[in-house]
Amino acid sequence: MRTGRPFFHHVNDIPLKYKFLLIYFLCVLLPIMTINLFFYQQNSANIRIREQDNLRKSIERASGELLGMIDESVALSHSIASDDSLYEALDRQYGSPVEYYDEYYSYLRDKLKRYMGAYPNILEIRIYTDNPTIQTGASYHVIGSVSRDLPWLGQLQQSDDNIMVVAYEEESGFNPGKRISVVSKMKSYSSYATYQKYLRIDLNVGKIYGILNREIDSLQLRLVDGQNRLVATGDGAEQQNAPIVPNPPATAKPDTVMERTIGNLSYVKGWKLIGTADTRRVDGMLDDARRSIIWLAVVSTVIPSLLIFVILRSYHYRVKKLSRHMQKVRNERFDPIDLQEGRDEIGGLIRTFNMMTGKITSLINDVYKLEIRQKSLELERVRTELSMLQSQMNPHFLFNTLNALLVVCTKNGYSDVTEIIKNLSLLMRQLLSRADGLVPLKEELQFTSMYLQIEKFRFGSLFDFAFDVDPAALPLRIPRMSIQPLVENACKHGLQARKGDRLIRVSAKLTERALEIGVVDNGVGMDGETLRRIMSDARSERETEGHVGIRNVYRRLELFYEGNVRFLLSSEPGAGTEAGFQIPLSRLESNEWKREA
């Protein structure tokens, strides 16, 4: 057991996702591909074996048919050679041509013709003799001046056999062309041996081509004679007794070429058939087999892969969800898992986890009630401090506003200040109408807009303001009076000392993480030392003079959001000032929940 532990420890260290991938590749994909590859190789081998067997059967069938034609002609040759009356007529000396023709018409003319109708594989039968008293014509020929046109005769005379099969080209006569003949010496009767006599039986070459062409689509057959000359091919082309190279073509595969002798008898000695399979047919069958195997591999891989993906995703998704919620437990967040847990083992774990978190939450509520009550008292103290800060800021704003109205009215002699007084009335009503400290951003921007209209009345055409607000941020609640003091500070310290056009831009943008509020002016700005002093005063607990609005906004945001707000203040001399803050969305949601609760 100890020797196996390190291996299992390594397995336990592999993430669950990679374990599933290993199971899929090693137990599903690899076996399927191996089986399909083995099946393809076996199928290809079977196709080649079957085609080679078909090649062997085809060449054996063609060889048997050719041998049958030759044996039929040999049998006929023996039958003709055993006719003694034919020997007597051929060996007789005729006194005149008239005497020969009398014998011809009475006996010789029909002697050979009667065999033609009974043997369809025989094209023609001829007898050759050196009897000068016989007249050449029809089926009987005198050897002499025409002997040079008999290429087969020399082969027969030089042979020790009485009968043989020859192939040659006949250039004279009524039907010149390719000839395959059974030729024999007529020596059956020694009493009729005054003259030499030879029998030639011409085979039907068209029938031979028919045998060779029978399977031309899958097999090319070549007939070779005893002198290793190409006699006929399966494509039916006429050959001129061209010598043949016994080796197969360079492009032919060894298992697609087969050679078979026509027979073992002396008259067909050396005759053979060479068959070359048409590899296009075999290749086509292999291509079909390959495509079938590929489709089978695709189907047998895709369907199981989809099923495995669905099953493993159900398992992995719930386990990962359970793992994430357990991480939350480590961070003291006891949220239940909200999903369809199922009835399997993982579903049982999820149900048990939900029961556990529920009991822990209940236990926490019971044990820490006293501590929560103490924190409520602390919250009341913070709210009291907020109210004090707001009561300090409101008279300051009202004093500045009334002072601005006094200066403007005295300087310009305005008597009708109805609109500005109306806005001021609305401002005061807004300050007194809310009991809590949170207002929608839309309401806070309206409050700020009314203040800016008052400032525009003060500065006249030399002052302008603009709002750039994300509509999605308008319903969010923020602390009351958190934008207007920044605007007021910009007017008082940034724009009042500027000569020329004055501009304030208020922006509110909602990002994925926070609500970003910004107030930008084109005032006189400040140097780095002044900027650091203002931020130091804002963080200090002691009372300070100047920039009261910035300090109040900073302190109220710190108290509301427990230090989770990022306060921004940047400036350059002569380039204006930018002030603002970023409230995390999680804190906005949390405060909204507390307010409604």
Image: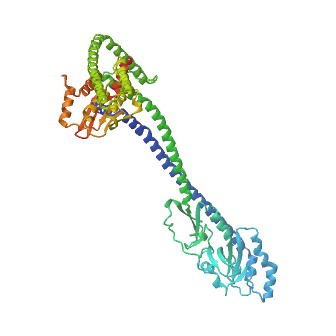
Observer-nearest of 505 and 254:
505
Does 234 sit above or below residue 457? below
Observer-nearest of 527 and 396:
396
Q: Which quadrant holds residue 449?
A: top left
Residue 71: x %, y % from top left: 66, 67
Observer-nearest of 331 and 498:
498
Observer-nearest of 254 and 102:
254
Apparent side of residue 462 relative to residue 551 in the rendered image (left or right): right
The quadrant in which the N terminus is found is top left
Apparent side of residue 64 relative to residue 288 in the rendered image (left or right): right
Residue 322: x %, y % from top left: 38, 25
Q: Is residue 322 visible?
A: no
Write the residue at 55% across / 51% down. 288
Does 4 sit above or below residue 99? above
Q: Is residue 508 visible?
A: yes
Residue 356: x %, y % from top left: 36, 17
Q: Which quadrant holds residue 541?
A: top left
Write the residue at 75% across / 77% down. 86
The quadrant in which the C terminus is found is top left
